[in-house]
Image (spheres, rainbow, N blue to C red):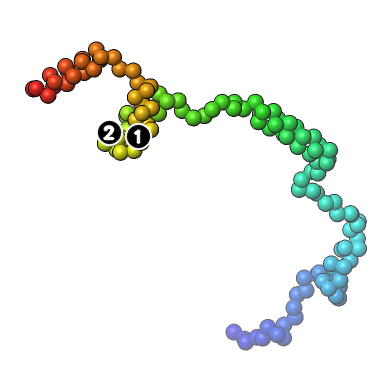
Amino acid sequence: MKPFKLDNEPKISSGFKVPENYFEDFTASLMQNLPAQEVRVVPLYRRTPVWLSAVAAIFIIALSLSLWFRMDTTNTQPDEAAIEDYLVYQANISSYDLIQNLDISDIKELEQNVAISDEAIEDYLQYETIYTNE
């Protein structure tokens, strides 16, 4: 076989030729050929009219004021029976603790308010002695 060099052989052309400076001028010529359009800005939110916000604020204030004045203004303190039940059923408060916290004025007030009949005292003593005798 006979040696040959590729540089010396004639080259086959592709048939397509690119004009000089075509790629450098391509973007400029393309932008000139496109019609100029105005860029439209799309808002992310719609502006509500100021008067609509004012009407909503007045409505909320009127509603809250009507609810405020309708609130029940009764006394929120518990009655004496509820306090007494609470103290009776509290496991961590002993009768000794209650006695230690009573003043002389409290004891006098209890003596005036509590009316105990003689029969109730006799019944209590009778049942108390039964339990203590056993």
- Residue 58 location, x and y as percent? 77, 34
Residue 8 located left or right of residue 99: right
Q: What residue appears at the point 82 percent right and 71 percent down from the top-left corner?
A: 23
Q: Count neighbours of disc 2 (C-alpha within 10 A) and say few if under 14, some if 14 to 19, many if 20 or more.
A: few
Please identify the quarter of the rendering in which residue 52 is found.
top right
Q: Are marks 1 and 2 in contact (CB under 8 Å)?
A: no
Q: Nearer the viewer, residue 29 or 5?
A: 29
- Nearest to viewer (mark 1 / mark 2): 1
What amino acid does circle 2 point to? Answer: Ser
Q: Quadrant of the N terminus?
A: bottom right
- Residue 104 location, x and y as percent? 35, 34
Q: CA distance from mark 1 to mark 2?
A: 16 Å
Residue at label 1? 104
Among all residues in the image, which is located at the extreme top?
Answer: 119
Among all residues in the image, which is located at the extreme left?
Answer: 134
Which secondary structure, mark 1?
helix
Residue 75 located left or right of residue 51: left
Q: What residue appears at the point 12 percent right and 19 percent down from the top-left corner?
A: 130
Q: Nearer the viewer, residue 70 or 115?
A: 115
Q: Which mark is residue 95?
A: 2
Position of 49 relative to 40 (above/below): above
Residue 93 in view in this figure: no
- Residue 111 location, x and y as percent? 34, 24
Residue 64 located left or right of residue 131: right
What amino acid does circle 1 point to? Answer: Ile
Position of 80 relative to 99 (above/below): above
